[in-house]
């Protein structure tokens, strides 16, 4: 675990401190995200942990040991480090980059090769990329190499400074998901810096919201920050869509879905019409043996005697139980049927989510 | 008196030893001057690149040396070192310094700050950073300086013929003075010095690419 006690940093010549009397604990195995506007000292704070910047006062401990009492080179080798621009060594291949710290630590060649192979697999880096140089990789691949490199010696602590900032939003989201998945298994103690509150909400176990001048405004889990912002600054920084952002933290599996109007292909058309009327939706899902075939309405059902005679239309979008309520909401507002259909693997129908159901969750904020 | 041909191949055939010796001397003087120049310039450049206020001092000093005409330079040294190899080498070495210092500092300046910070953050010591990251990354610029210095030194070596060295420059000087068959010696001397310069340039260009495979790959990617 990492602990900061009354840490301040004044840069020579600056009128105000960059970080002011900051106290913060990063519990073991958790991700603490430092977030705030530029000038809030988040990167400075992070760099004081591995002594790339030295604090003016206060103490920083990593695993109970004062960092200022340690040799900075040894300290840094025990802390994984990923920076915004990744900083891959351009003159070394992907494999050599990943092996940077093991090399510095003098591992033997077989052990290094085994570890590089292992990390390449974890980070979905094709073996043929290993002998290439960083300039030959895509942005997403470079980010993966950067994170893999930081994990090479399996350090218990990682510092990540906007590690996913240099790629487009689609790739960024995928990298975030991948990293969350990996972190779920390796449980590192992570200090993560970003200026993007959405990234903070997504990645953090706890968020530290910093204000200009390195003042800690709130330190709490994402859900709490969205539900109960400590002050006006936090409220403004979190943004106007607090309810929506909180929806992003709730998974579909956490709430009860409605059954919704359903019929089976063997049902007479009249049953389907009745279900449409009673639900008020004007359409009904067709389920066969638990599997969702699609939906039908008056128009599709015209002239049919049984549901099986009609050709069901496919839903434009589905959500799964792993998706968030925010994704479900998106699905509701973008489909013609105005509901989110919840399915499990193999298109098994689980139920529907309506706008009313989701707004109940927003209101409960 | 029979008229000599423009190039007297018979004379050439009879004097291969002389030509070979002069060629070897030329190569040797060049290698010594460039090698010693690099050895002097490298630590100075690494030192001043980090201490920016000293850079103008180093650049100014090597620049001043560069402006001294070579004949005058050797003349100034003769009272101290006579007609020795040292007298020939000191100016040759001095002229390489400006080229090396500029190229090495430019090369080190070109190392991205991110790369430097990431390397330190991962636990490179300052010394490891220098030798394993900064200097390798500056190699293309350093070797570019080496090419420039070598080609210019190959040309300058000929002038040291004035103090009895000169490599193939001897053939030129002795030709001009009609101590050797004029057109033959001058042509052979000129062709050999140009050939050396071209060979050195091409050879070092290859070295530059071999030492910096990552730059080659970047190029192939932009084309592909």
Image (cartoon, rainbow, N blue to C red):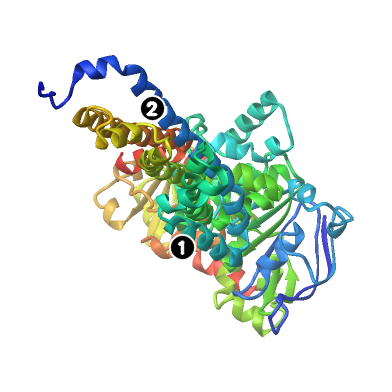
In the depicted view, which residue is nearer to us: A220 or A113? A113
| Residue B1 visible to the viewer | yes
The structure residue drawn at horizontal position 59% and vertical position 40%, both measured from the top left corner, is A97
Q: Position of residue A187 (x, y in %)?
A: 74, 47
Where disc 1 sits, the SS reads helix
Disc on res. B22: 2
Task: Name which quarter of the figure residue A138 lies in.
Answer: top left
Whether residue A221 sits left or right of residue B27 in the image: it is: right
In the depicted view, which residue is nearer to us: A298 or A167? A167
Disc on res. A190: none
Label 1: which residue?
A330
| Residue B134 visible to the viewer | no
Residue B174 sits above or below residue A297 on the image: above
Task: Check if mark 1's residue and mark 2's residue have beta carbons within 8 Å.
Answer: no
Tell if the residue under mark 1 belongs to the same chain as the one under mark 2: no
Figure label count: 2
Q: Position of residue A172 (x, y in %)?
A: 51, 54
Q: Position of residue A125 (x, y in %)?
A: 52, 36
Quarter of the image with the C terminus of chain B in it: top left
């Amino acid at each position: 675990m990492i602990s900061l006690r009354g840490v301040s940093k004044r840069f020579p010549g600056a009128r105000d401190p960059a970080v002011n009397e900051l106290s913060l604990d990063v519990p073991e195995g958790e991700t603490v995200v430092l977030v705030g506007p530029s000038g809030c000292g988040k990167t400075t704070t992070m760099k004081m942990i591995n002594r790339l910047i030295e604090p003016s006062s206060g103490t920083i401990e990593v695993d109970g040991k004062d960092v200022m009492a340690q040799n900075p080179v040894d300290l840094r080798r025990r802390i994984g480090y990923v920076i915004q621009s990744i900083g891959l060594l351009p003159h070394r291949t992907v494999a050599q980059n990943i092996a940077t710290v093991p090399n510095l630590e003098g591992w033997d060649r077989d052990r290094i090769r085994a570890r590089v192979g292992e990390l390449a697999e974890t980070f979905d880096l094709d073996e043929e990329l290993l002998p290439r140089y960083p300039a030959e990789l895509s942005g997403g691949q470079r980010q993966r190499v950067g994170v893999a490199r930081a994990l090479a010696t399996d350090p218990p602590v990682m510092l990540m400074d906007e590690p996913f900032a240099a790629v487009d939003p689609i790739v960024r989201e995928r990298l975030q998901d991948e990293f969350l998945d990996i972190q779920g298994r390796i449980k590192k103690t992570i200090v993560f810096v970003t200026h993007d509150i959405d990234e903070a909400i997504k990645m953090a176990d706890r968020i530290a919201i910093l204000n200009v001048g390195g003042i800690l405004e709130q330190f709490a889990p994402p859900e709490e920050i969205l539900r109960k912002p400590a002050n006006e600054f936090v409220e403004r920084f979190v943004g106007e869509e607090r309810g929506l952002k909180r929806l992003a933290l709730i998974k579909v599996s956490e709430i009860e879905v409605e059954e919704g109007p359903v019929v089976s292909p063997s049902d007479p058309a009249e049953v389907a019409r009745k279900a449409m009327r009673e639900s008020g939706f004007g359409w009904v899902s067709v389920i066969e043996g638990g599997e969702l075939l699609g939906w039908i309405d008056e128009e599709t059902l015209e002239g049919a005697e049984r549901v099986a005679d009609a050709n069901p239309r496919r839903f434009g979008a589905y959500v799964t139980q792993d998706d968030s309520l925010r994704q479900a909401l998106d699905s509701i507002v973008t489909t013609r049927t105005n509901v989110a259909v919840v399915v499990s693997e193999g298109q098994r129908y689980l139920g529907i989510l309506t706008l009313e159901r989701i707004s109940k969750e927003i209101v409960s904020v | 008196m029979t008229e000599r041909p423009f190039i007297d191949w018979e004379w050439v055939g009879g004097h291969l030893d002389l030509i070979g010796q002069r060629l070897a001397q030329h190569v040797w003087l060049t290698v010594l001057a460039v090698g010693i120049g690099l050895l002097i310039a490298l630590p100075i450049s690494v030192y001043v690149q980090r201490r920016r206020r000293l850079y103008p001092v180093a650049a100014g000093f090597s620049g001043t040396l560069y402006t001294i005409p070579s004949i005058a330079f050797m003349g100034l040294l003769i009272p101290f070192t006579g007609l020795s190899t040292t007298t020939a080498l000191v100016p040759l070495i001095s002229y390489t310094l400006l080229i090396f210092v500029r190229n090495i500092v430019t090369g080190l300046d070109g190392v991205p700050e991110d790369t430097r910070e990431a390397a330190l953050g991962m636990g490179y010591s300052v010394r490891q950073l220098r030798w394993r990251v900064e200097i390798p990354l500056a190699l293309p610029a350093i070797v570019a300086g080496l090419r420039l210095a070598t080609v210019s030194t190959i040309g300058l070596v000929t002038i040291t013929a004035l103090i009895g060295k000169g490599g193939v420059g001897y053939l030129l000087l002795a030709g001009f003075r009609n101590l050797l068959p004029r057109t033959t010696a001058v042509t052979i001397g000129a062709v050999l010095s140009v050939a050396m310069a071209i060979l050195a340039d091409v050879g070092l260009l290859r070295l530059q690419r071999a030492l910096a495979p990552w730059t080659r790959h970047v190029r192939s990617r932009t084309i592909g």
